[in-house]
Image (tube, helix red, strand yellow):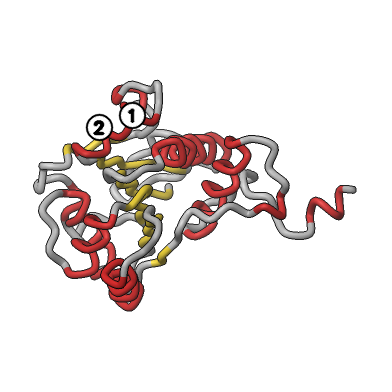
Amino acid sequence: MKRFVVGISGASGMPLAVTLLRGLRAAARTLPGQPDLAGQSALSGGVQTHLVVSDAARQVLALESDLRAEDLLALADVVHDARDFGAPPSSGSWPHDGMVVCPCSMSTLAAIAHGTGSNLLHRAADVTLKERRPLVLVVRETPLSRVHLRNMLAAAEAGAVIMPPCPGFYARPASVQDILDHLAGRILDQIGVPNALAARWGEAAERE
């Protein structure tokens, strides 16, 4: 079983976070279920998603979506309170296969880049870096200040993948959801989750 942590911070981009979680849920249905490291069967086939949502993210969700917080949380297998430092993702002794912070606010980026976290999301990302596991930061801000750019460089030097949600217009998206699907698929690529969400360069021409 593959086990991933998803952190959602208080930046704009909740529809992308929802699409990402749905992509992980779809992967759970298509990948074969295998016993986890403790010998237990996967909760959702071959992928298990652990979710940490900040308080600010809940506020942004209400602004950007008709979804309730309960609807968002229901997309994960396990939900951890962002204030709970006793939760498994806060320790390197708890194995997982990668973490995505989507969207990643600039304050969350700064906390991760400088190791000064104040909640479980920050701590889980810090642990992911120190254990040399994949960490993808879907940074969401524009324009970017020098402080933002320096923090991105610091996080990248520590091992994180800095992944701004830049649309791939070569796929000729016909809707906002097409753009979200492509972005979510590219994020899943970074953590090794097979998916059919992202349009692949050259494939459209081959189909034609």
Corner quadrant of residue 181: top right
Which quadrant would residue 84 be assigned to in this image? Answer: top left
Location of residue 141 with respect to 149 vertically, above or below? above
Q: Residues within 10 Å of mark 1 (few under 14, many from 20)?
A: few
Query: What is the x, y in percent for residue 11?
Result: 32, 45
**On the rendered structure, is 86 left or right of 103?**
left
Q: Are marks 2 and 1 in contact (CB under 8 Å)?
A: yes
Please give the name of the residue rendered at 86% of the width and 54% of the height, measured from the top-left corner.
206
Q: From what the image shows, is residue 159 above or below residue 134?
A: below
- Look at label 2 and name its amino acid: Gln
Q: Tell me which residue sits at (29%, 74%) in the image.
A: 150
Q: Which of the numbered marks, if any, corresponds to residue 51?
A: none
Q: Which residue is mark 1?
A: 63
Q: Nearer the viewer, residue 57 or 190?
A: 57
- Who is closer to the viewer here, 29 or 112? 112
Tell me the tag on residue 59.
2
Report the residue that reaches farthest toward the bottom: 157
Place of residue 102 in the rendered image (x, y in percent of width and height, measured from the top left): 37, 48
Q: Position of residue 200 (x, y in %)?
A: 70, 55
Name the residue at 29% across, 25% down. 69
Q: Find numbered disc 2 in the image and state the secondary structure of the residue it sits on.
A: helix
Q: Residue at x 48, y 53 (%)?
A: 165
Measure the C-alpha gap from mark 2 to mark 1: 7 Å
What is the crowding at mark 2: few (fewer than 14 residues within 10 Å), some, or many (at least 20)?
Answer: few
Q: Is residue 127 visible?
A: no
Is 38 displayed left or right of 163 in the figure? left
